[in-house]
Amino acid sequence: MNSTVRVSWNEAERVRGRLLGYRIYYKRLGPKAERSRRSLRQSQHEEERGRSKQSSETDEHSWQVEEVDHSKTSAEVTGLRLFSEYELTVTAFNSKGESPHSPPHRFHTPEGVPGPPASLEFESPTEKSLNLSWSPPAETNGILQGYIVQYQQEVESKNSPVEILNVNDPKVKHITLDNLDRDSHYVFKVIARTKTGEGPPITRRGATLLDGEPPKNITVTSGNTSVNLSWVPGERNRNHGFHIQYFKKSASLDQHHSRIIRKSRRIR
């Protein structure tokens, strides 16, 4: 049942003493799709190798334990990861110790909606276009079918329409948006989807870069034989280079000098 499994068992027999309860051991073996492609020999080899690893590994492939009162012969194990294969055994225990494990049972959880894409970045090749790129969700929870890209122009005092683009190839993780308003900011969303449905979006706000505006807040600090010159380019300006002109005044002739500083900028 999604991320929950219900386990039932027969009451323990030949208990030497007072039965205190049962323990349910379970661990995640891996994603369902990945495990289905492995041979039984590969699976057994990996499990044996996994048992010899140090406990510093992540908990997802380690045994988890649920303890149940002696009066119960069923329980629900919750918090399982979707689209995964698990192995589960049950033991009985009293004050002297624990019984041998029951034969292992393997089961898988169903496919679900994915998590949000792990990242979203964009670059601005022109004043009216953006290149969006993203990375797959950390939790796919199934087989990805593709992505949905949404973007909406920020306009004061009214709601602008939401533009929707479908990316039907899950291997494609970038798209170019053209004909954007150079004077506006936009809200961008990317949503991953499986056959079960759409997951939550990753959201970023941004705008294209602009050309042609001169730097602002220019300051000059002079030394004995040098000058420290600083300025602040506009937040959205695409300044590929700065051309600095300066000259020395004298009684006879002005000596002109110039220097070009190259600098490029991309949105991240």
Image (spheres, grey):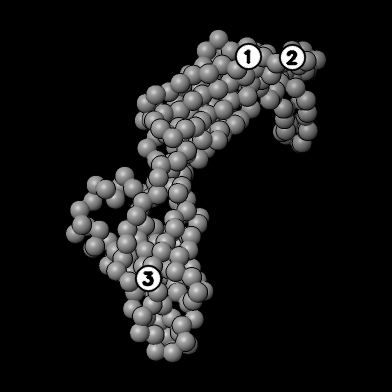
Name the residue that disc number 2 marks.
158
Circle 3 Cα neighbour tier, 10 Å, few/some/many (<14 / 14–19 / ≥20): few
The numbered disc on residue 10 is: 3
Report the residue at 50% width, 57% height from top.
Answer: 78
Report the residue at 49% width, 81% height from top.
Answer: 20
- CA separation, marks 2 and 1? 10 Å
Name the residue that disc number 1 marks.
161
Left or right of 45 in this view: 189: right
Q: Is residue 96 above or below residue 84?
A: below
- Callout 1 secondary element: loop
- Callout 3 secondary element: loop
- Callout 2 secondary element: loop
Three-letter code for the amino acid on which mark 1 is drawn? Pro
User: Does the residue at mark 3 contact the one at mark 1 (Cβ under 8 Å)?
Assistant: no
- CA separation, marks 3 and 1? 60 Å
Task: Please tell me which of labels 2 and 3 falls first in the chain.
Answer: 3
Which quadrant of the figure contains the C terminus?
top right
Residue 260, by quadrant, is top right
| x and y, in percent, of residue 147 in the image | 45, 28
User: Does the residue at mark 2 contact the one at mark 3 (Cβ under 8 Å)?
Assistant: no
| x and y, in percent, of residue 161 in the image | 63, 14
- CA separation, marks 2 and 3? 64 Å
Report the residue at 45% width, 74% height from top.
Answer: 22
Q: Is residue 34 visible?
A: yes
Left or right of 166 in this view: 10: left
Circle 1 Cα neighbour tier, 10 Å, few/some/many (<14 / 14–19 / ≥20): few
